[in-house]
Image: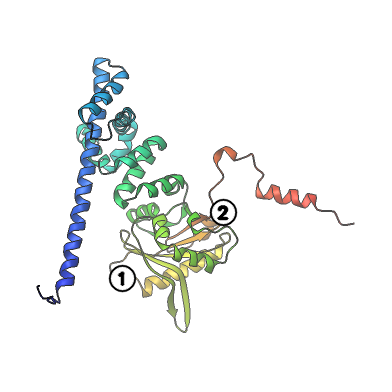
Amino acid sequence: MSRSISYPEYPAFLAEVKARIQHARLSAGRAVNQELILLYWDIGQGIVEKQRNTGWGDAVVERLASDLRAAFPDVRGFSAANLWRMKQLYTVHTAPEFLAQAVREFSGLEANAEKLAQAVREFVAVVPWGHHVYMLGRVSDPAARLYYLRATAQFGWSRNVLLNQIKAEAYERAVVEKKTHNFERALPEHLAEQADEMLKSRYNLEFLGIHREVKERDLEDRMIAHLQRFILELGYGFCFIGRQYRLALGRKEYFVDLLFYHRFLKALVAFDLKVGSFEPEHAGKMDFYLNLLNDKERGPEDQPSIGIILCAEKDDIEVEFSLKTKSNPIGVAEYQLQTKLPAEFKGRLPTRRQLAEAVRGALPKEK
């Protein structure tokens, strides 16, 4: 029986080996997934080209599925429904509308259609098949599809995260909807564009589970308790620094609700939480905080600090006028705590104002 010998360096060595094994397993898994998607792409392309060049009808898909299952009885994924999805995978991502969006992703390939198509094929292969199946049935807008593909590839979204992001209209909030900020006046052009991409028009905080009126500190507490999901909602690149971050000026102290550092903007990002509507004085307070951050916390290589005011409601014109004279970059966004009313019900149910008027009308009048 061998004696147990103590090696002081062993725990660190074991940790390194385990990390290397885990990395190898992940790399192998990604490689297998990419080969699978490339295979499905090629099968879909083959079906499309044969139908186009030989006049084969749709019945060939059913026949091909039957023959493939007979040839590979132990291999899953060759059902007729899946073959239709392979065909859709190819047609959707080679459509002119999608390629027009992809040109922005792969700059420099505008004039070379063959290289652009190859780049798209390899880009699509990074995303797992289950994610594609979900998007093929739910995302029709080419620009939105490219957004979710890029986000899944960059952020490593699971299928459930992708599902929640699509349901929460992440694309619309990050790209389509109007955003209110002064980035174009307060930042250099290239940095202003990146900051605009970082900011969303509104933030979905439904995961906080708040169904009643709360105080700002309660809202902050919930965000910290669900910090991982909050950072996921903010987007890639945010690193949490602290809550109620202390800033001293002379004998007085000031506190930033939430402070982050953005890895790609290379800038501090301060959040001020408001449970009510935006007020002009909120912009002045944030401008003051950013002056302090730039003077006392900003690193030598950092870009100017950015402020984001999160509020329950805002008036875009009021925000625009409030930010006109502010020299620091500030964005104002709404947050939602509950799912919005489905589009089919809009206009059918009374508004909050209509309900209030109805209640007042039902009260007995004073004599």
- Identify the image quadrant of the N terminus: bottom left
Report, in whole angstroms, how far the alpha carbon at label 2 lies from the one at label 1. Answer: 34 Å
Question: What's under tag 1, amino acid-wise?
Answer: Gly
Q: Is residue 135 above or below residue 251?
A: above
Where residue 168 sits: x, y (%)?
A: 46, 48
Residue 44 in which image quadrant: top left
Image side of residue 76 versus residue 249, left or right: left
Q: Which residue is mark 2?
A: 315
Residue lying furthest top in this view?
Answer: 55
278 and 185: which is toward the camera? 278
- Secondary structure of residue under mark 2: loop
Q: Is residue 103 above or below residue 62?
A: below
Residue at the (17%, 67%) spot, across then down: 14
Where residue 332 sits: x, y (%)?
A: 49, 57
Residue 118 in which image quadrant: top left
- Secondary structure of residue under mark 1: loop
Question: What's under tag 2, amino acid-wise?
Answer: Asp
Tell me, for residue 299, which label it has, or none.
Answer: 1
Of callouts 2 and 1, which one flags the residue occurring earlier in the amino acid sequence?
1
Residue lying furthest left in this view?
Answer: 2
Residue at the (55%, 66%) spot, across then down: 281
Residue lying furthest right in this view?
Answer: 367
